[in-house]
Amino acid sequence: MAHSNGGVTAWDSIRPLSDSEFDQIRRLAHRVFGLDLKAGKQELVSSRLGRLVRQGGFRSYDDYYRSIVGDRTGESLAEMIDALTTNHTAFIREADHFTFLKREVLPRLAARQLVDVWSAACSTGEEVWSLAGTLYEALGPRRSLVIGSDISSRALEFAERAIYPTDRCAGLPASWRGKFFEPVDEASSAYRVTAALRAQATFRRLNLIEPIPWTRQVPVIFCRNVMIYFDAATQEKVVRQLAERLEPEGYLFVGHAESLSRISHGLEYVRPAVYRKAAQVRSRWNKSS
């Protein structure tokens, strides 16, 4: 039988998140994946982590925190990251980016044998498939590769599965249904990305605040609507790493709610939420790779 302990009913409740507990979770989130949980986010943290605290049978957020720190597998930490990060996205989100990509950027890459684009915070994959479809239409089959990365294992699993409920497909161009998306059942309750388009994407888990484990450079990076969760110092670090993986004259796309004007980055402003890396020695545009 449940019993009362200091006004809190044991077994069916947990102690409210205290200021000190919030502070230790906030410091862990910032240290591990750069999330800037400002003062005032205490209710959000309590709400999003409360389910994990209860499921784990912990009596307090401090007990939960200690279990994360003591878990050498990293699985508990990954669960916390998934719970705290917002994986909201949509197909062809901020459509003018895709128009600019198709009209201004891809024609300069048309002579290449392969064009690779990095979706650096791909969430549940809608951005990856939006890019893959845009590249396919502009360049043809088997001439592009979209690399999707995200810190959330849960989001990446969803992205790789590539099945989306019908209501999440509302923003798709009409011509893409049937061409790039096929119904999974007779009722068309969900759509799956076609095998041809899935072959033009690959996924990997990546924490953007950690050293990026490859040296290859790409002509286009989309890193949208993730910078808003970082403080200025973390933004600067992330953008510097992204710029290092960008080819000379390559483009970085950020979210329209984001701006790089308050940090040092060395990229050229092109238009709202679009930046370009300066040319170095000689341009790689129009060079087969």
Image (tube, rainbow, N blue to C red):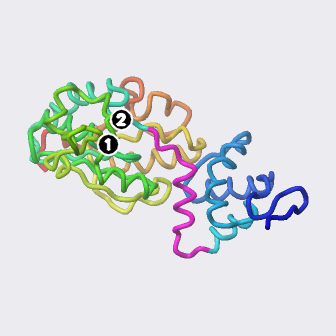
Residue drawn at the location 31% of the way across and 56% of the way down: 203
Tag 1 and tag 2, C-beta contact below 8 Å: yes
Residue designated by label 1: 164
x and y, in percent, of residue 10 in the image: 80, 63
Quadrant for residue 202, please give it: bottom left
Q: Is residue 113 left or right of residue 215?
A: left
Badge 1 crowding class, 10 Å Cα cut-off, few under 14, some 14 to 19, many 20 or more, is many
Marks 1 and 2 sit apart, C-alpha to C-alpha, by 6 Å
Residue 283 appears in view = no
Q: Is residue 86 left or right of residue 10?
A: left
x and y, in percent, of residue 12 in the image: 73, 59
Residue drawn at the location 11% of the way across and 45% of the way down: 143
Q: Could you tell me the amino acid type at mark 1?
A: Tyr
Placement of 159 over or under 95, stated as above or below: below
Of residues 227 and 200, the one nearer the viewer is 200
Residue designated by label 2: 168
The residue stretch that appears in magenta: 71-88
Residue 252 appears in view = yes
